[in-house]
Amino acid sequence: MLDDIDTRLLAALQRDAHLTAQELGETLNLSPSQAGRRRQRLESEGYIQGYTARLDPVRLGLNVQGFVQVHLGTHGPDHSRSFARLMASRAEIVSVWTMTGDADYLLRVYCEDLPSLNRLIHEVLLPHPAVSRVHSQIVMDQLKRDGPLPT
């Protein structure tokens, strides 16, 4: 069970994962060792799954962000495993969700340009034996960046 100090610690780390035990302690009114132990406990209990850097896709030459809805024509465990392996093998597919509703999967993709997105759809996704159709949407602007989880 998380207490108020734990939730404040998680919120602080979501804002800045580089905070030292000293800085966390100052923020939470704890000693650095207490703050460090709490952080380690939250890591070991799985509340904190890791630390990553947020990169600028445009600076990396990834000028097209899109969402692709994938509709399967064939369902079954073999096709699902095969599709999951395909998703894991493609760096430009950064997130995949199984969905309720019309589409079976929703993909978030980053590509260099529109021809790259077109190749992904026509040479990678549509040839998969379980895929019947896809529907893509290109992001014009992202009004809110992926934010921290509410704590």
Image: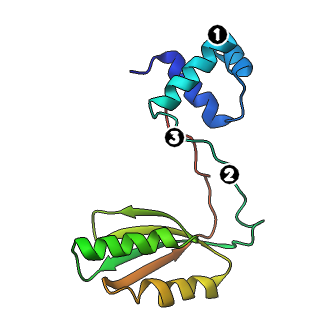
Q: Name the residue under label 2.
A: 54
Callout 3 crowding tier (Cα within 10 Å): few <14, some 14–19, many ≥20:
few
Colour pattern of the rendering: rainbow
Residue 103 appearing in the image: no
User: Label 2's element?
Assistant: loop
Image quarter of residue 69: bottom left
Q: Which residue is drawn at 44% across and 75% down?
A: 86
Residue at mark 1 to residue at mark 3: CA–CA distance = 23 Å
Rendered image: mark on residue 94 = none
Q: From what the image shows, is residue 2 above or below residue 108?
A: above
Image coordinates of residue 3 in percent, x first then y, are: 45, 17
Check disc 1 and report the residue beneath it: 30
Placement of 144 over or under 28, stated as above or below: below
Residue at 61 percent of width and 12 percent of height: 34
Mark 2 vs 3, N-terminal side: 3
Q: In this view, does 130 lie above or below 18?
A: below
Which kind of residue does numbered mark 2 sit on?
Arg
Query: Looking at the picture, which amino acid does disc 1 mark?
Result: Leu
User: Which element is circle 1 on?
Assistant: loop
Q: Nearer the viewer, mark 1 or mark 3?
A: 3
Q: Are marks 2 and 3 in contact (CB under 8 Å)?
A: no
For the point 58% across and 18% down, which residue is it?
37
- The x and y percentages for residue 48 are 52, 35
Question: Quadrant of the rendered structure where residue 21 is?
Answer: top right
* Secondary element at tag 3: loop
Residue 134, position in %: x, y? 40, 82
Q: In this view, does 134 lie to the left or right of 11?
A: left
Q: How far apart are marks 1 and 2 (CA)?
A: 28 Å
- Is the N terminus in the top left, top right, bottom left or bottom right quadrant? top left
Label 3, on which residue?
Answer: 49
